[in-house]
Amino acid sequence: MSGPSVTSLGKPIASGNTAEVYAWEDGQVLKLFHERFAYGAVEYEAKIAQAVHAAGLPVPAVGPIIEVDGRSGLVYERTDGSTMGQVLERKPWNVFTFARLLAELQADMHASGIAPEIPSLRRRLERKIQSAKALPDNLREAALNALEHMPDGEQLCHGDFHPYNVLMTARGPVIIDWVDATRGNPVADVVRSSVLIEGAVAAMPSIRRRHREVLRWMHAIYRRHYFRLCPDAQQQAAAWWPIIAAARTSENIAELQEWLLAQVKAGLG
């Protein structure tokens, strides 16, 4: 008996830069990765997903790895809902509630236990900064030197935590896309979220002006609430900012590079 084909899966429920999501069986979905993603990378995401689910966080349960037409996919528990960002686009008056919720979800994440085999945030930042072609050598050296002097940590860090990676479901918020999860200093994870949101507001032309203002408000409220929940974090945030911006340049997003380099120069130049 032959296995499923992409055609037999029907129309995707959702699609993104890394994968397409299809309805599966028994209340599940199949996250089918694009062909450029190696099997090892999918195995890695499965390991991360299992670890964060075991930590008791509001995340989808993960099942087996499936191959469809030479592409690797992961079976996940189905969690229907729109992302927090999508809901804000339609209902911007939720900005205050959602901003506080975003901070609370991240603070809870940082307080949770996590398996020791999760990769090191510090090592990941080092690799990103070393490989960032857009960084001049003097800024690369300054960023690596600054990173060396930052305090380490063992907390769970999402690595890509923003309003479009939180699903608003009937059972409550569910955090998705854990492939960048690490263990490390939680302040670096908060600053990573800030750099993602601030960069999008400042430099991504695809974002409508009205929604740009909503995201700007959300970011300010989110940071203020997180630092109220975790007051010790605020002292480190400014020092982490240019380091995280330097690492982000390695992702080669053309619209963001000028803005990111300006952040690195302002903090380390």
Image: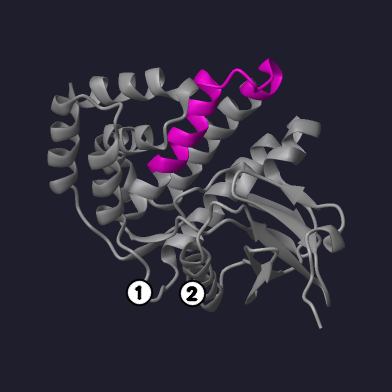
Q: Quadrant of residue 104?
A: bottom right
x, y (%) of residue 181?
A: 44, 59
Residue 267 position (above or below residue 147): above
Q: Residue at x 43, y 65 (%)?
A: 111
Rendered residue at 87%/57% (across/down): 10
> Type of residue at label 1?
Glu
Name the foreground residue: 98 vs 262.
262
Residue type marked 2: Ala
Q: Does the residue at mark 2 contact the one at mark 1 (Cβ under 8 Å)? A: yes
- Element class at badge 2: helix
* Magenta segment boundaries in residue numbering: 191-212
Q: Residue at label 2?
A: 51
Residue 158 position in % (x across, y down) = 47, 55
Kindly give the residue lying farthest to the front in the view shown.
1
| Distance from Cα at disc 2 to Cα at disc 1 | 9 Å
The residue pinned by badge 1 equals: 117
Instruction: Check the picture and name the quadrant holding the N terminus.
Output: bottom right
Between residue 65 and residue 175, name the one nearer to us. Answer: 65
Q: Is residue 231 visible?
A: no
* Visible residue check, residue 226: yes
Q: State whether residue 128 is above or below residue 115.
A: above
Q: Quadrant of residue 209?
A: top right
Looking at the rendered structure, the secondary structure element under dot 1 is loop
Residue 254 location (% of width, % of height):
46, 23
